[in-house]
């Protein structure tokens, strides 16, 4: 799948979800546009966070373990191959 195809598919999924869940809103299209923008900002923040971890040589499992709001309880879903996202 190319980048353009992925963006088009993602946009269709968001639009389909919005049509089904936001139909009663005063301006459903605008609400869906804003929701899509918030989702993209969330993904950007996550990507920048992982890039910062890697820049400082901190692996994702280590970062999850020391997270004061989640810590070891959240680490149970961490996949072993995530180490490659860290200092490796």
Image (cartoon, rainbow, N blue to C red):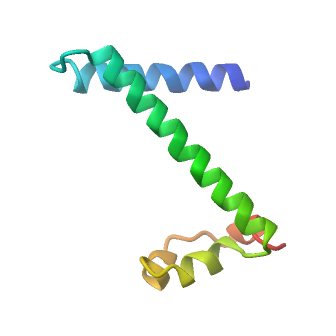
Quadrant holding the C terminus: bottom right
The x, y position of residue 87, in whole percent, is 81, 73
Q: In this view, does 20 lie to the left or right of 88?
A: left
From the viewer's perspective, is residue 42 above or below residue 74? above
39 and 11: which is toward the camera: 39
Quadrant holding the N terminus: top right
Q: Is residue 49 left or right of residue 12?
A: right
Query: At 53% across and 37% down in the image, what residue appears?
Result: 40
From the viewer's perspective, is residue 56 above or below residue 7? below
- Disc tally is 0
Query: At 23% across and 27% down in the image, what residue appears?
Result: 21
The x, y position of residue 16, in whole percent, is 36, 20
Query: At 76% across and 70% down in the image, what residue appears?
Result: 86
The x, y position of residue 28, in whole percent, is 27, 17
For residue 27, which quarter of the picture?
top left
The x, y position of residue 37, in whole percent, is 48, 31
For residue 55, which quarter of the picture?
bottom right
Query: At 45% across and 29% down in the image, what residue appears?
Result: 36
In this view, which residue lies farthest toward the left? 24
Q: In this view, does 88 lie to the left or right of 24?
A: right
Q: Is residue 4 left or right of residue 8?
A: right
In this view, which residue lies farthest toward the right? 88
């Amino acid at each position: 799948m190319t980048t353009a195809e992925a963006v088009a598919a993602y946009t269709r999924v968001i639009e389909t979800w919005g049509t089904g869940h936001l139909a009663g809103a005063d301006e459903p299209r605008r609400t869906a546009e804003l929701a899509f923008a918030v989702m993209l900002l969330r993904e950007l923040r996550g990507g920048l966070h992982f890039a910062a971890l890697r820049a400082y040589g901190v692996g994702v499992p280590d970062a999850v373990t020391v997270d004061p709001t989640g810590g070891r309880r959240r680490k149970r879903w961490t996949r072993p191959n995530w180490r490659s996202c860290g200092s490796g």
